[in-house]
Image: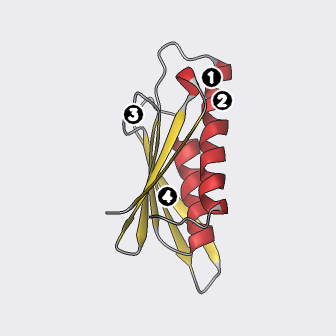
Amino acid sequence: MEVYESNIGEGNTSVKLTARLLGGDFVVFVYNKNAHIGAVAVGEYDLSNKRASTSVITRLGHKEDIVAQKAAYLISNYTKKAVCVVAGMHIDNITRDEIKQLVENSHKLVEDFISKGCKIS
């Protein structure tokens, strides 16, 4: 199975994005060195109404829904395909600045994936 991988950041706020095709759909993982399932978002593009929408499930006590939902929406809106994003990042005793940096790094990875045409090879 072909894969796209990219990472950004250093130390605790290093984030990786891995994407694969499952048939014609995208499965995307956004995670750090402490990868896990924190939130899952599904993006769907409605061809008749020309808009993307998302649904999100967040595990108890987790906050990765903000990353998963935005990624699923943006990738689905760009590709006009179904997208499943699994996000899971953990840092012990995380600070507000680290949270901000993880979210920013995650968004940059998604934007970079889209800017490259969501090509998986």
Q: Nearer the viewer, residue 51 or 84?
A: 84
Q: Residue farthest to the front?
A: 121
Could you tell me if the residues under marks 3 and 1 are in contact, i.e. CB atoms within 8 Å? no
| SS of the residue under disc 1 | helix
Image height of 110 relative to 103, above or below: below
Label 4: which residue?
Answer: 55
Q: Of the two numbered discs 3 and 1 on the same chain, state the one appearing first in sequence.
A: 3
Question: Residue beneath label 2, please?
Answer: 101
Residue for point 56% across, 75% down: 80
Q: Which numbered disc covers residue 6?
A: none
The residue under label 2 is which amino acid type? Answer: Gln
Label 3 sits on a secondary structure element that is loop
Q: Residue at x 62, y 69 (%)?
A: 78
Q: Three-letter amino acid code at disc 4?
A: Ser
Q: CA distance from mark 2 to mark 3?
A: 16 Å
Helix, strand or loop at mark 2: helix
Quarter of the image that includes the C terminus: bottom left
| Cα–Cα gap, marks 1 and 4 | 26 Å
What type is the residue that disc 3 sits on?
Answer: Ala
Residue 89, how many percent across, how many down? Answer: 47, 32
